Amino acid sequence: MAKGMRAVNVRQSVLSWPVVRQLTGGDPLGRGSAVTSARTEALQPRTVTADRVVKSICPYCAVGCGQRVFVKDEKVVQIEGDPDSPISRGRLCPKGSASEQLVNSPGRQTAMLYRRPYGTEWEPLDLETATDMIADRVLASRAATWQDVDDQGRKLRRTLGIAGLGGATLDNEENYLIKKLFTAMGAIQIENQARI
């Protein structure tokens, strides 16, 4: 009895091979059902189970490609190109396609960290304290390095003690505002990492 069952199982196993299904079924080129396994049939895209879809803009370069962000249980589960975007028309570069990792990475920092001069450890700071520290240092540096006029009396109204370097994860609007802020402070050394 066991030998007969084994023979039946072997026969069923051989009949389930994709090449056998391809030659005996309705998919002679092997591009559809003949080569699809039961496991593959059971798979579902992450986007099917999403609670909602939020439209966004890719945070990386200055192109501003449209994204569709799929959210489930208040967590981003997938990011795809937005076909309604007139800029990218549903396409994303490899970096934009992987931007879900920017949100869900276990190494993502979610707190302000500060290392004191000559310190060896980082310590968390609250946002207000960190912002005050930055503002105080910017004002002190600007005051110490301000150049109102040059040697010949020509107006300069600038500082060489402050420089700005924007990042590629900032969008157009953020980079625009940073440029305006640094220019208003008198800085002339302003660059963006995405352009370098």
Image (cartoon, helix red, strand yellow):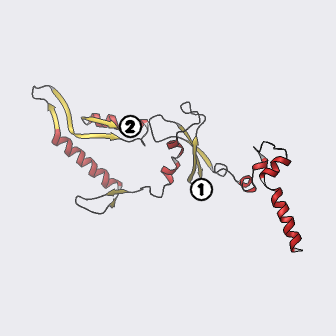
| Kind of residue at badge 2 | Asn
* Residue at 45% across, 38% down: 61
Mark 2 secondary-structure assignment:
helix
Left or right: 193 as drawn, with respect to 142: right
| Kind of residue at badge 1 | Asp
- Extreme bottom residue here? 1
Judging depth in this view, the residue of 167 and 147 nearest the camera is 167
Left or right: 16 as drawn, with respect to 57: right
Q: Position of residue 9 (x, y in %)?
A: 84, 65
Rendered position, 196 above or below 117:
above
Q: Position of residue 196 (x, y in %)?
A: 36, 36
Dot 2: within a 10 Å radius of its alpha carbon, few (fewer than 14), some, or many (20 or more) residues? some
CA–CA distance in space, label 1 to label 2: 32 Å
* Residue at 45% across, 41% down: 60
Q: Which residue is mark 1?
A: 73
Q: Which disc, if any, is residue 175?
A: 2
Marks 1 and 2, the one that precedes in the sequence: 1
Displayed quadrant of residue 173: top left
* Residue at 56% across, 30% down: 86
Q: Position of residue 182 (x, y in %)?
A: 29, 37
Rendered position, 181 above or below 48:
above
Foreground mark, 1 or 2?
Answer: 2
Mark 1 secondary-structure assignment:
loop
Judging depth in this view, the residue of 49 and 21 nearest the camera is 21
Q: Position of residue 29 (x, y in %)?
A: 78, 42
Displayed quadrant of residue 15: bottom right
* Residue at 16% across, 42% down: 144
Left or right: 17 as drawn, with respect to 110: right
